[in-house]
Image: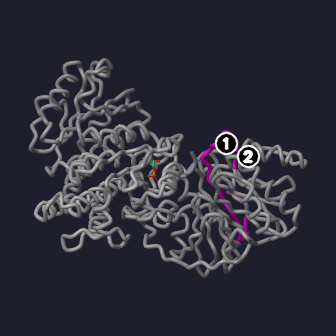
């Protein structure tokens, strides 16, 4: 998954492109490149992070006011300057940047080699430049015809920005499945893979649909459908502000976003709870509709999947209807048997994760209602789902999700309470008490940030050398330990596993030896003793028990180090226990001196399979 950006207007394009790419670097940082049109198209590329390209451009005098740029997350072809974008067609007629994957690129290479095209890189993207050039030269009907024929011919996902030698000062764009947003202000027209890249310049954006294309002129945008007919688009306004995409004095976006959680949790609750009543009418989900569902399926990837595992416990316990949680990459190819009176919930921060998008389409193909719990407004999953409940976390820049995770938990709780109430599984009193406790969560999260951060920072440095760690718990504590373990793995590169505490003695406890770090989570008072006895077993094997528990549960005898959090009700503890779990991962990673916001081999949202 890469980041593309483009600008065509009155100002020097190089500054706007480099600034935009710096805001998209969380999408990939294996190489970067730009193409600027001045008298001719000039291309500059560099392997590695954007700073390497800035270095190259330092003494270049680029005055062109039209250009495209790219930051790469390598899928086809190793990170190298040769594989970096922009790519050009054999005779330089077509210059292009691409985000996505062309699945039938090998077949197209053979076709194009039969037409004397040569290939210099290992990328699937270079095929796009030459196949567009091929149609452009064969039918001589201009850029839109060449691009539309290409969209029909290629299989896969793409967001592309293209410059044609014979159409100087114009940028042509098209997309299928990969994200793209087009912005406009008095100084010109902007295109990007994500909002943060253009937020500094405009909040007025167009959403371009699947298999649609557009021509970006200096002062206007012309949209085309697949027949090459001009189509109209409405300019929409984005609510996020620029500062949301800046670090605001924090060392890393991850710690900034961790500290934003009280505010975004409050914002998300307030957007759905009015006068102590949950209101989903904004997305058209009525109580009658919610009442009708006999089965729920939650489908997602990575951390979003972990929200699903937490939500399963709360939904089943409150609504008494069966809930299945599925990994999207498995769900989409497993030909799942879905209950016609079911609801498929897709959870996704970016709304662009390829496997989750495909799972959504699988459910829709089977005629099952679909609900997206999404953070990025106007993203593909948000646009294709029957219903959407937006989380109000704001733009999340750090690859490791934190604040979006917390707002997804809140929306899941609200959904469980509203379905249970619609099905008369809970009465008004329970309903009110649940909401009363939920609105206390932001302050309890703030309490944890204010009172545990220093302590966690201190102990984390003790663990910067470890090779392995374990996270254990029961019930909802097991569900959230999955997230704690992933957070540590993805940013600190320390091998870690999460286990249902009761499972340990069936094998894994053999891995516990002196000072093995075991993070134990115990909040569920109905299974408290069971968890404690598992912690005792680990400690007796020499494990170092770092335990997270609420004030009212006594853990001092069994813990080597205790992290005490405020009390709440069993359902809501994941919203509190996840905070110290995030802080442990962050501070261990900082103590290892690693790049917290851009962990190796990862990208913010995975728009390829
Ligand atoms: C989490 O920190 C990771 N970035 C990753 O597991 C992520 O949760 C997963 O890729 C799903 O992304 P989405 O929420 O944007 O669909």
> Which residue sits furthest front?
340
The numbered dot on residue 105 is 2
Q: Which residues are magenta?
A: 58-84
Q: CA distance from mark 1 to mark 2?
A: 10 Å
- Residue 185 in the image, given as x and y percentages of width and height: 58, 79
How far across and down, in percent of the image, does residue 54 sit? Answer: 64, 55
For disc 1, the neighbor class at 10 Å (few under 14, some 14 to 19, many from 20) is some
State the image quarter where residue 390 is shown.
bottom left
Question: Residue 328's spot in the image, x, y percent?
Answer: 46, 46
At x 43%, y 70%, the residue is: 241
Mark 2: which secondary structure? helix
Near-viewer residue (28 or 531):
531
- Judge from the rendering whether residue 40 lies leftward or rightward of residue 515; answer left or right: right
Placement of 607 over or under 514, stated as above or below: below
Which mark is drawn over residue 285? Answer: none
Which residue in the protein does label 1 denote?
76
Identify the residue shown where x is 54% and y is 62%. Answer: 194
Q: Nearer the viewer, mark 1 or mark 2?
A: 2
Residue 30, picture quadrant:
top right
Per the picture, the main secondary structure of the magenta-coloured stretch is: loop
Q: Is residue 66 magenta?
A: yes
Above or below: residue 130 compared with residue 20: above
Confirm or reject: label 1 Cβ below 8 Å from ligand 1: no
- Asked if the stretch drawn in magenta spans residue 579, the answer is no
Q: Are marks 1 and 2 in contact (CB under 8 Å)?
A: yes
Label 2 environment density (alpha carbons within 10 Å; few <14, some 14–19, many ≥20): many
Q: Residue at x 29, y 43 (%)?
A: 480
Task: Out of 427 and 513, give the one closest to the viewer.
Answer: 427
């Amino acid at each position: 998954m890469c980041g593309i950006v483009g600008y065509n207007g009155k100002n020097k394009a190089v500054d706007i492109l480099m600034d935009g790419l710096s805001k998209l670097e969380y999408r990939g940082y294996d190489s970067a490149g730009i193409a600027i049109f001045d008298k001719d198209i000039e291309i500059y590329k560099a392997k590695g992070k954007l700073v390497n390209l800035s270095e190259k451009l330092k003494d270049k005098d680029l005055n062109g006011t039209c250009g495209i740029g790219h930051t790469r997350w390598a899928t086809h072809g190793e990170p190298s300057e040769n594989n970096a974008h922009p790519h050009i067609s054999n005779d330089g007629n077509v210059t292009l940047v691409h985000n996505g994957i062309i699945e039938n690129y090998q077949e197209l290479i053979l076709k194009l080699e039969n037409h004397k095209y040569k290939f210099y890189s290992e990328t699937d993207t270079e095929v796009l430049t030459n196949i567009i050039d091929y149609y452009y030269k064969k039918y001589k009907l201009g850029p839109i015809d060449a691009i539309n024929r290409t969209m029909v011919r290629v299989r896969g996902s793409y967001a592309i920005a293209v410059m044609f030698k014979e159409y100087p000062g114009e940028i042509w764009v098209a997309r299928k499945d990969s994200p793209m947003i087009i912005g406009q202000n008095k100084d010109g027209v902007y295109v990007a893979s994500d909002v943060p890249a253009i937020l500094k310049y405009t909040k007025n954006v167009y959403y371009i649909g699947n298999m649609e294309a557009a021509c970006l002129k200096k002062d206007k945008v012309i949209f085309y459908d697949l027949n090459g007919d001009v189509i109209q688009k409405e300019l929409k306004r984005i609510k996020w502000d620029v500062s949301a995409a800046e670090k605001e004095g924090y060392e890393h976006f991850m710690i900034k976003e961790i500290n934003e959680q009280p505010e975004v949790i409050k914002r998300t609750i307030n957007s759905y709870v009015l006068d102590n009543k949950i209101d989903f009418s904004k997305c058209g989900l009525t109580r009658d509709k919610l009442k009708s569902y006999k089965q729920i399926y939650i489908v997602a990837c990575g951390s979003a999947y972990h929200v699903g595992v937490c939500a399963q416990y709360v939904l089943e316990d409150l609504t008494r209807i069966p809930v299945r949680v599925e990994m999207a990459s498995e769900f989409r190819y497993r030909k799942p048997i879905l209950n016609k009176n079911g609801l498929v919930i897709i959870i996704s921060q970016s709304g662009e994760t390829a496997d989750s998008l495909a799972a959504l389409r699988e459910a829709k193909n089977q005629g099952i209602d679909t609900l997206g719990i999404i953070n990025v407004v106007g993203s593909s999953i948000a646009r294709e789902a029957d219903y959407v409940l937006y989380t109000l976390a704001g733009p999340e820049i750090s690859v490791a999700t934190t604040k979006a995770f917390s707002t997804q938990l809140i929306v899941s709780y609200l959904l469980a309470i509203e379905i249970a109430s619609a099905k008369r599984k809970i009465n008004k009193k329970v309903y009110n008490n649940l909401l009363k406790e939920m609105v206390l969560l932001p302050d309890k999260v703030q309490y944890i940030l204010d009172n545990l951060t220093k302590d966690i920072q201190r102990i984390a440095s003790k663990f910067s050398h470890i090779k392995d760690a374990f996270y254990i718990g029961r019930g909802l504590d097991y569900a959230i330990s999955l997230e704690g373990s992933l957070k540590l793995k993805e940013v600190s590169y320390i091998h870690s596993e999460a286990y249902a505490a009761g499972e340990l003695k069936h094998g894994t406890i053999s891995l516990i030896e002196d000072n093995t770090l075991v993070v134990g989570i115990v909040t569920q008072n109905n299974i408290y003793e069971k968890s404690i006895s598992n912690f005792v077993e680990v400690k007796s094997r020499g494990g170092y028990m770092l335990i997270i528990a609420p004030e009212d549960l006594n853990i001092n005898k069994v813990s080597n180090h205790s992290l005490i959090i405020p009390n709440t009700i069993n359902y809501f503890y994941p919203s509190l226990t996840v905070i110290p779990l995030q802080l442990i991962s962050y501070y261990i990673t900082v103590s290892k001196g690693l790049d917290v916001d851009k962990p190796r081999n990862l990208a913010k949202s995975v728009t390829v399979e």
